Image (cartoon, helix red, strand yellow):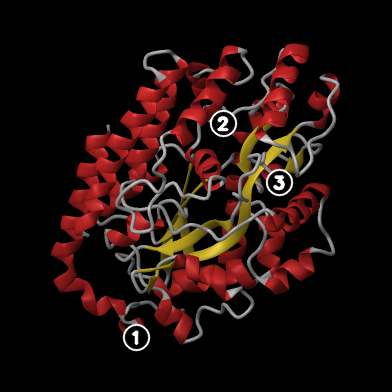
């Protein structure tokens, strides 16, 4: 599978290079778009998410089409699994949708392969209005001297916890100063006293990245050509924690997690009262609010004697395909999505805290309990955050798969933990070393 993904990415690069000569003029705003407001324009748009996001986004698209009768949307909602592989395949065939919901983990890959349009000209000519957006946030979408992603929400890694399950286990609610030892003790107590999982989704690259950052390192080197930490003991200690929790059934085994993840976010164990916690982004609490409006947020555990590992990030971007024939119309939609209070009333902060300060101020007067929880958590998270790492490098998909495979082998006792950590470094560095010539 990893070889197929790498081959596909390399094929995309070759395709894009072959198209450069005949398409470079299209990078100029004045020659990008053929349509005018008297002509029907069909915009293809894709995003990943839960059923709640799918429903709200369709309502949003209907509203935009009502206000702009010349625009017709063709929507392609999706789950997370396989989303970016499909986009890469579409990129190889020059058939990507016009508007693409993009993630911080993958924007580097899609920019490097030349699949995304540079939106800086639209910012320069005023079609894209980012005056109410923190310019530091805007820079997260700038790579290789191009603006290829427009942030559309703010989020941070968080623990979502179920107070009812903590009560059933006779535990105090977690606090921002809790440590990994506190976390492990609580998760084991929850399983022992309720029979439920203590937590889920520890087998996640973002959680491991948070773990690494608490040692003062990063998961990837700054130039993206190797791992960013040198001591294999960092991964060893993470694997030891996971193994201890899994042996006591405080976290699901890989087969159990495969079944859980297929059900969607609204049916995750923490939502339905079958787990004390889960790791996810802070907007998870809004996504799950209809299914369970009692969930709470807490910062992930701290490493005793370690450094702050959290970071505030764009929950996602909107990007535009370089192959799109309707870039200006796509930009106008993104501008409306970000700056319109009417649009954000429909979105309902489900994609994270709005990036427009004007929209945030207006929303603060009418927040639901779960939205307020997310907004308040963001203030706490800032106190435990340090600078965000650069976007994940080319090859991140392969490294993420390697990490998952490594953890699964340890969970099933197919490999010694120390050997697993060493092998992961060798294979991950081999995958990332391809960036040395890019």
Left or right of residue 3, residue 144 in this image: right
Up-down relation of residue 329 to residue 172 (above or below)? below
User: The C terminus lies in which quarter of the figure?
Assistant: bottom left
Q: Position of residue 390 (x, y in %)?
A: 44, 59
Q: Give the residue drawn at x 36%, y 46%.
A: 227
Q: Upstream in the sequence, badge 1 or badge 2?
A: 1
Q: Extreme front residue here?
A: 305
Residue at image mark 1: 30
Q: Secondary structure at mark 3?
A: helix
Residue at image mark 3: 286
Residue 36 seen by the camera: no
Up-down relation of residue 136 to residue 194 (above or below)? below
Q: CA distance from mark 1 to mark 3?
A: 40 Å
Between residues 221 and 363, which one lies in front from this camera angle? 221
Residue at image mark 2: 201
Q: Upstream in the sequence, badge 1 or badge 3?
A: 1
- Neighbourhood count class around disc 2 (C-alpha, 10 Å): few under 14, some 14–19, many 20 upward: some
Q: Secondary structure at mark 1?
A: helix
Q: Quadrant of residue 356?
A: bottom right
Of circles 1 and 3, which is in front? 3
Of circles 2 and 3, which is in front? 2
- Neighbourhood count class around disc 1 (C-alpha, 10 Å): few under 14, some 14–19, many 20 upward: few
Up-down relation of residue 128 to residue 211 (above or below)? below
Of circles 1 and 2, which is in front? 2
Q: CA distance from mark 2 to mark 3?
A: 18 Å
Q: Secondary structure at mark 2?
A: loop
Q: Quadrant of residue 353?
A: bottom right
């Amino acid at each position: 599978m990893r070889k197929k993904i790498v081959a596909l990415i390399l094929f995309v690069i070759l395709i894009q290079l072959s198209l450069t000569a005949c398409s470079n003029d299209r990078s100029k705003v004045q020659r990008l778009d053929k349509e005018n407001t008297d002509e029907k324009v069909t915009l293809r748009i894709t995003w990943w998410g839960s059923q709640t996001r799918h429903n709200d986004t369709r309502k949003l698209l209907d509203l935009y089409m009502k206000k702009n009768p010349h625009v017709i949307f063709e929507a392609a909602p999706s789950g997370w699994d396989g989303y970016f592989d499909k986009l890469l395949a579409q990129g190889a065939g020059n058939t990507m949708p016009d508007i693409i919901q993009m993630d911080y983990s993958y924007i580097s890959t899609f920019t490097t392969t030349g699949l995304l349009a540079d939106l800086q000209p639209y910012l320069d000519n005023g079609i894209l209005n980012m005056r109410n957006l923190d310019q530091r946030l805007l820079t997260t979408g700038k790579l290789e001297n191009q603006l290829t992603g427009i942030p559309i929400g703010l989020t941070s890694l968080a623990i979502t916890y179920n107070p009812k399950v903590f009560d059933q286990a006779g535990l105090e609610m977690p606090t921002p100063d809790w440590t990994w030892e506190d976390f492990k003790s609580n998760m084991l107590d929850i399983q022992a006293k309720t029979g439920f999982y203590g937590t889920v989704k520890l087998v996640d690259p973002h959680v491991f990245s948070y773990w690494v950052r608490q040692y003062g390192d990063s998961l990837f080197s700054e130039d993206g050509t190797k791992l960013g930490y040198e001591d294999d003991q960092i991964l060893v200690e993470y694997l030891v924690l996971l193994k201890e929790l899994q042996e006591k059934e405080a976290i699901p085994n890989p087969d159990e997690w495969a079944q859980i993840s297929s059900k969607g976010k609204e049916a995750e164990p923490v939502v339905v009262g079958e787990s004390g916690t889960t790791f996810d982004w802070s907007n998870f609490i809004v996504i799950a609010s209809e299914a369970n409006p009692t969930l709470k947020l807490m910062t992930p555990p701290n490493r005793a004697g370690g450094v702050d590992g959290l970071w505030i990030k764009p929950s996602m971007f909107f990007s535009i395909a370089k192959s799109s024939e309707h870039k200006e119309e796509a930009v106008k939609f993104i501008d409306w999505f970000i700056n319109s209070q009417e649009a954000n009333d429909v979105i309902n902060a489900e994609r994270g805290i709005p990036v427009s300060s004007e929209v945030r101020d207006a929303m603060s007067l009418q927040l639901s309990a779960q939205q307020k929880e997310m907004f308040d958590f963001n203030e706490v998270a800032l106190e435990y955050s340090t600078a965000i790492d650069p976007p994940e490098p080319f090859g991140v998909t392969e490294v993420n798969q390697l990490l998952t495979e490594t953890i699964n082998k340890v969970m099933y006792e197919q490999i010694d933990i120390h050997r697993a950590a060493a092998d992961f470094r060798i294979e991950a560095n081999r995958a990332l070393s391809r960036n040395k010539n890019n």
